[in-house]
Amino acid sequence: MNEILVLAEHRRGELREITFDLIARGRQLAEKAGAELVAVVLGRGTDGFCATLAQYADRVLVVEDDALRDFNSEPYQAVLAQLISERQPLLTLIGHTACGLDLAPSLAVQLDAALVTDCLEVEIDGGKLTAVRPAYGGRVRASLQAREATHRIATIQAGNAPSPRARDSAGEIVKLQSPLAEEMAYKKLLEYVDTAAGEIDISQSEIIVSVGRGIGDPKNITLVEDLANALGGVLACSRPVVDKKWLPKARQVGISGKTVHPKLYLAIGISGAFQHVTAIKGAGMVVAINKDPKAPIFRVADYGIVGDLFAVVPTLKEKIARAKAGK
Amino acid sequence: MDIIVCVKRVPDLAEADIVIDRSQRDIEKDDLVFDINEWDNYALEEAVLLKEKLGGTVTTITLGDEDAEEVLRRALAVGADNAVHLDDAAFAGGDAYATAKALAAAIREMPYDLVLAGAQAGDDGYGQVGATLAELLGIPHATLVTSLEVDGKIARVRRELEAGLEEVMELGLPAVLTIQTGINEPRYVSIAGIRRVARREIDVRKASDLGLSAAEVGAAGSKTEIEKLSLPPAAQKGDILEGSTAVVAEKLAAIFASKGWLG
Ligand SMILES: Cc1cc2nc3c(=O)[nH]c(=O)nc-3n(C[C@H](O)[C@H](O)[C@H](O)COP(=O)(O)OP(=O)(O)OC[C@H]3O[C@@H](n4cnc5c(N)ncnc54)[C@H](O)[C@@H]3O)c2cc1C
């Protein structure tokens, strides 16, 4: 069918932001291809989601089932595989998120579909799927093309799409019978756990001084902490610092940590990976200190210092102390 | 408990100048330093930790050219019992699907209760091989695993979601789990340790040994192809402060002061 399918992602009763990225992307593609934009909602008690999505999509397909209440790749895959085989959409868009990563690859195998993951840009032209995606941790861009296949799936990186435009009138909501027969025994969700809660909520801070893997050794962290104190800010960090257990998870900035909106975000020895910088978009000013002039962090920094943090940080602390003392 | 762990040798680009090669489809790799993929290193450690706790074997497998052997040696030094190297010119240029297909063909013939892989590789970053492999093997999977306990025929795992949230799941074994960084603290491997396993035998297999034709693997067996690589625009958003350390620190302090942040 001449449809672009978009999988709505929701968690704990809320549609996730990525859904709107997918809708916006899907709309652009649908317009170009003269196709319809179709949102797919899998869940339980989804009336609110459907009403919201119908403002944007030409059609909302809903499958309700207890097994779909929370995301689980197994029932999701079973339902989507059937839906996609029946409808033969031009393209199916899924978020490149924890859900999408768990779902898209095995779904693609079941459907014998061509899959491109973590796309920044996607085009579908005469049934041919091409995409631009990052490689080498975002330091290279790769243009890919999918070979001829019956089905095409792309997972889309979060946070790069414009806001979706509402339709003049609400799209149609179509309830479909759940194809799930018996309970699937393989994979069960037991509970959600919040690991980022802790002694401090860095997302409330106005000034954040953040340290990355460039710090090299946990005993050097006091250097950065001293600077944070001099600025009256809080100490935060990138993921590797938490992975190595040098600082607690509550201090991690990024897609799997905290999203922050300080007036100042000072990144020290942080390269600027997508998963990190996507969470500092709301910062008033970003300053980076990094010895690598090509570090991607400089692409988002308002001010940058190219240099060795072990020289720059103590000097900066001293200058700040002096300025504060009015000298 | 028999565990298989998939590993990949990737270039470490931390301090490297990246140059796109003449084919435009790859980067110049001659001057790069290579190592085990960061995520796979955590997967390897997790496999060895499980073996130390529950007994059994760890078999490590990689697909790659002859240089890829060094990550297998490393895995043996860490504690893997066996090493399998899928090495054939026909495997070259494969996408995540083609790679998973070759891995699946090899793994299908081995005894296993659990297959571990990295959640993604630092080079291609597809994040696709582990779950693709699971589906090809017809077993369940969980991606982005941050903790793992095995209890008989059940694995209880935590999967990382966004914003610090994790989900606790149970899976029936055998299963494929893709491992996220931070799940453990990978042990240090000394050169001497690697030297000690220099003579251990590595099981090298070609596509034909796996019952696969050249058309089914590598670039020919892929569902996607790279048309072109490019370097993202170096566009700097803001100002790079120039001068000696003292000068740039002074400039930055002055900027902070002008904002009224220095009280
Ligand atoms: C699913 C998923 C979720 C993720 N979630 C997050 C997340 O929430 N948060 C996060 O941060 N990352 C996250 N990551 C990891 C992310 O991809 C990067 O690996 C990580 O952000 C890199 O951290 P870094 O910049 O500190 O380290 P690196 O990339 O290693 O960068 C270190 C930097 O320090 C610089 N440096 C080294 N020495 C010095 C010196 N002496 N002086 C000055 N500079 C120096 C180097 O030039 C380099 O730029 C996630 C990844 C995945 C796959």
Image (tube, coloured by chain):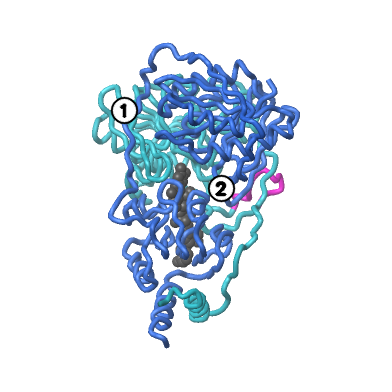
**So how many labels did they put on this image?**
2
Chain B color in figure:
cyan
**Viewed as shown, does residue B24 lie left or right of B84?**
right
In this rendering, is residue A311 above or below B162? below
Q: What range of the chain is rendered magenta?
A: B20-30
Q: Secondary structure at mark 1?
A: strand
* Mark drawn on residue A136: 2
Quarter containing the N terminus of chain A: top right
* Secondary-structure class at tag 2: helix
**Quadrant of res A57:** top right
- Give residue A29's position: percent from left, percent from top: 69, 35
Q: Residues within 10 Å of mark 1 (few under 14, many from 20)?
A: many
Residue B243 in the figure: left or right of residue B149: right
Residue B172 in the image: x percent, y percent? 34, 22
Specify the label residue B155 is tagged with.
1
Identity of the residue drawn at 48% across and 30% down: A48
Which chain does tag 1 point to?
A: B
Mark 2–mark 1 Cα distance, whole angstroms, equals 32 Å
Amino acid on which disc 1 is placed: Ala
How many other residues sit within 10 Å of disc 2, few (<14), some (14-19) or many (≥20)?
many
Instruction: Kindly indicate whether the residues beneath marks 2 and 1 are on one polypeptide chain.
Output: no
- Percent position (x, y) of residue B224? 64, 32
* Chain rendered blue: A
Name the foreground residue: A237 vs B73.
Answer: A237
Kindly report which numbered mark, 2 or 1, lies closer to the viewer in this rendering. Answer: 1
Indicate the chain on which mark 2 is placed: A
Quadrant of the drawing holding the C terminus of chain A: bottom left
The amino acid type of the residue labelled 2 equals Tyr
Q: Main secondary structure of the magenta part?
A: loop
